[in-house]
Amino acid sequence: MYALIACGVFRPEIEHLAGTLGFPTEVHYLDPGLHVSFDALESKLRDALEACRAKRTIVAFGACHPRMEEMLAEYGAALLDCQNCVDAFITREEVERRAARGLYFYLSPGWIEVWPDIFRQLGWGQDEARLEMGCFKGAVFIDTLGNAAKYEDDLLNFLDFTLLTYEVVPGNLEHFSSLIRQAARSLGG
């Protein structure tokens, strides 16, 4: 049995992949809003790691904390081989290719569900969000589940709140699941 401690932003994709990873997995989701505080993220992640100590533990996060690898090493846990949730879905090479076009804010099904709460935790109203996100040329919705039409109203709400236009690009759940399987293999599975 593996424990998979995952950022809640990955919930839609992990639930979609349920039963397809090739090994039994017990999933523990952490609040995506923890990213606004390194202390809170570290505390909740350590609590989850402690609760999963008896299992081979995969951590589905990117390099979201400056001491992420150090924390995981204490528990013998494996981190996904990605910088963040964006390149977990479209690969680092694709992120770099897209970055040549300019700076974009990336959303996924999980992100589109939680951005209002994260913005509230940051203390961002509409004016603050527009100011803080003014450096972005637009937003990119990574359609990891192949159902972008379901999120059209949510994307329009994001556009209205931030003034960022958006485009939809296909995601790659095969890449994401391969990162999880690679982490499992690194733990001897």
Image (cartoon, helix red, strand yellow):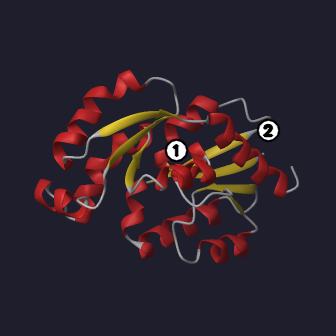
Q: Quadrant of residue 96?
A: bottom right
Q: Quadrant of residue 33?
A: bottom left
- Label pair 1/2, CB-CB below 8 angstroms: no
Compared with residue 179, is residue 174 higher up or lower down, i.e. above or below?
above
Residue drawn at point x = 58 percent, y = 47 percent: 94
Is 111 left or right of 176, judged from the image as shown? left
Is 75 left or right of 154, judged from the image as shown? right
Q: Position of residue 188 (x, y in %)?
A: 88, 55
Find the residue positioned furthest to the left: 127
What residue is shown with label 2? 23
Residue drawn at point x = 31 percent, y = 52 percent: 137
The circle on residue 135 is none
Compared with residue 55, is residue 39 higher up or lower down, i.e. above or below?
below
Residue drawn at point x = 34 percent, y = 28 percent: 151
Residue drawn at point x = 43 percent, y = 76 percent: 39
Q: Position of residue 22 (x, y in %)?
A: 80, 34
Q: Amino acid at mark 2?
A: Phe
Foreground: 44 or 150?
150
Is 97 left or right of 184, judged from the image as shown? left
Is 22 left or right of 71, judged from the image as shown? right
Q: Amino acid at mark 1?
A: Phe
Task: Indicate the secondary structure of the residue bearing disc 1.
Answer: helix
Q: Quadrant of residue 48?
A: bottom right
* Label 2: how many Cα within 10 Å (few below 14, some 14–19, many 20+): few
Q: Earlier in the sequence, mark 1 or mark 2?
A: 1
What residue is shown with label 1? 10
Q: Position of residue 141 (x, y in %)?
A: 41, 38
**Measured Cα–Cα span from mark 1 to mark 2:** 18 Å
Foreground: 45 or 118?
118
Total numbered labels? 2
* Label 1: how many Cα within 10 Å (few below 14, some 14–19, many 20+): many
Q: Position of residue 25 (x, y in %)?
A: 71, 41
